[in-house]
Structure formats: C-alpha cells, structure tokens
Amino acid sequence: MKTKRTIFILINTLRGGGAEKVLIDILRRINFDRYEITLGLVFPSGVHINKIPSQVKLIYLMPENPFFSRLLNKIMFEWPNKIGVDFLTKIFINIRFNETYDLEVAFMEGLSTKYLRYKNNRNKRIAWVHTDLKNNHYTSSLFESVSEESRFYNSYDQIIFVSKESMLEFNEMFGVPKNKQLVQSNLIPRSEILYKSEEFQVSKSKFTIVSVGRLEIQKAFYRLIEVAKFLKNEGYEFEIWLIGEGELEADLKAQVQNLDLTSEVQFLGYKHNPYPYIKAADLYLNTSITEGYPLSVCEAICLGKVVVCTSSPGSREILGDNEFGIITYHESYAIFSSIKQLIDTPELFEEYEEKSLERAKIFDEKKTMREIENILG
C-alpha cells in the first residue's frame, strides 16, 4: 500500500475571510487517498471550523483555556519584537507543533508565515500570498523591518501567489528569487455556487447593489456608503445589501445614520450562504483598497452579475481592461459615476451581464484542484 504524503497547513484562523474559505474549499475536494492533512490554527476560532472535513486532523497553537490564551496572546502579539519573546515563541511553537511532515504550508501572510518558519522539524516549505502586500502591508507590525520579513520569505522553498500582478508587487518589496515563485489562481467552486444560489429566494423591489466582505479597513466600505449618498442625491431608487461582519460595523452604521441612508443601506451580517442574495441583486460592488484575487467578485461573475470594482491586481486579472466588468479609480465619485452610467444605459448593463457569464467559464474547479495537488506533490 502506497504511503500517503503528510502535509501540515498553518493558517491564522478560520474566520469569514476569502483565504479561509478558499482553504476550506480545497480541503473539501482534496484526495485523501493521496494526502494525510493536519491543519494548524494559530487561534481556535472562526465560522468555518465546522466545515473542516473529518479526515483532517486539527490542532491549535493557542490553547483553548481562556486564561492561558490571553496570557500567551499578550506575550506573543502585543510584544512581538521584544527581546526574548521570539525565543520563547519558538519554544512554544515547537511544543505545540512537534511532528514532522513531508510538506509544510503557511496558507496566509503574517503570523502563519512567521510561525511556520520557527518550526525545527522541516522538509519542504511553501508560503501562500493572498493579497497585494505592497498596497496592503498589514503584516508589517509582526516584523522588525521589511528586510526581516524578506528574510522569512526567502527561507521558504516556494511562494504561491494568487495573481500575477500581486507577485510583481511583492517582488518590488521583497525580491524573492524567480525560481521560487508560482502563480496559482484561487479555487472557485462554480457548480457549488450555482447550486447554493437556488437554496432559497430573496425578494427585492428596487435596483439592488450587493457587496460581501469583512467590515475592515482594507475593504473600504465607507466608499460604498458615500456612493449611496451620491445615488440618493441624484434621485435614484435603490437599495444596497452589505453582507459581512467585522470590527468596523459600528463605525459604518454610524456613517449610514449620519448621512440619512438607513432606508437605502442594509447591513445583513455574516451569511453562511450569500449566493441567493448575490443572485437576486442587480449589481455587485467591490470597493477594496487592494485585492490579491477577490473571491467575492469571482462568485458574482459565476452568477452572471454585472461587477463594478476598484482597481487592484486581482480585479484587473479577473475583469481585464473593463472587458468583463467595470474597474474604477479609488474615489467614491468615480465608483458612483460608473454605476450611474450602467443604470442610465440599459444596453451597456445587458452587455456586461453577458460578458460576466462568458468570463465565468474560466473557473474550472477540477483543473484548479489538479494544479493545487501538483503543487502539494
């Protein structure tokens, strides 16, 4: 009997983000006759934990005991660059993650990439980069300098990028040898998206815009609310559905209240199945500061939605030069102008609906899984 290839995958949490969902989609489709998977979580939390296949062994870095978890959290994350803390962190990581694997994968930037490097037992290591770190360098506080972060990345055997442009932006910062780099598009389970979009019906009575994502700085949902104000001032009848949760929810709701948009902007919270809402809406809007490969945009395209998206490496790779959707500048008025043009020009709107369905054909989940399994070996 052939021995299975043992793989350890480390990710920060399984919260409701795009990278986390991609990982779950991969694990649900991977060949367990070929691989023995152990999944490590830095934090024992996230909405996707109950979706982990039973064949996957799950281990946590942070203990589930609240007292010890708070203590370690303070030491490891509030003082990440203090003298002696790195040394203690390395010891703790090697106690918690003490087994040897054929392949180790840091599936996210930041903590996963840093902590996997601390493991003593190692064969081949891969780091996955899901964002444009040049324009969204959210990991900077975890390293003493860009040079230190670069050394961590250079210690990996291979780095996987979700888009070509995000790889080029990464190279401007970190300069990893080209023979270590590979672009691999995210897994987009098109057939499942179409199936789940039929699970229930969502009714609407006005032109409806939908947006999905964590309510955090990088998603720039304040722009969406400003767009709503412009649309209202122009006299349009519309509704915006914002699906997601996060630390900025109170601030965004206050902005909606202050701009008198409570009838127009609806906060729907996190949805395990957002697809019926995306299907029911007329237009999908992405306002992010940057994206490596925007998962929600891909999902909207699978459902034939017209997409308006701020410019980023991922959006340009998916939508082309306004060929399959409209890419705008990072200004609320520019986003509004693009939406206004679509509403006012029905033939243009219909053209982009057709283009969206055409573009959805690139999402071949079987082909993508073959490519990912080739990476895993």
Image (cartoon, helix red, strand yellow):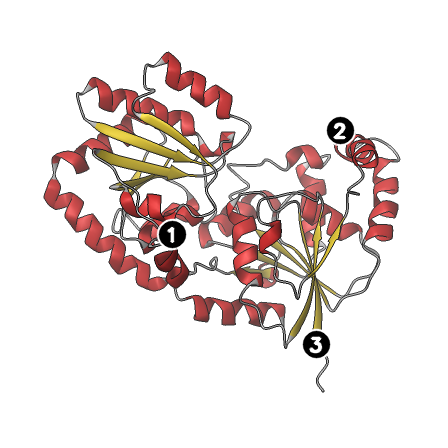
Q: Nearer the viewer, residue 307 or 201?
A: 201
Badge 2 crowding class, 10 Å Cα cut-off, few under 14, some 14 to 19, many 20 or more, is few
- Left/right placement of residue 316 relative to residue 246 reads left
Instruction: Say what secondary structure mark 3 lies in.
Output: loop
Mark seen at residue 298: 1
> Disc 2 versus disc 3: distance between alpha carbons?
39 Å
- Quarter of the picture containing the C terminus is bottom right
Residue 250 image offset from top left, x and y in percent: 50, 21
- Verify CB contact (< 8 Å) between mark 1 and mark 3: no
Instruction: Say what secondary structure mark 1 lies in.
Output: helix
Residue 154 image offset from top left, x and y in percent: 68, 53
- Quarter of the picture containing the N terminus is bottom right
Relative to 331, residue 62 above or below: below
Mark seen at residue 78: 2
- Left/right placement of residue 114 relative to residue 231 reads right
Residue at left offset 51%, top offset 43%:
132
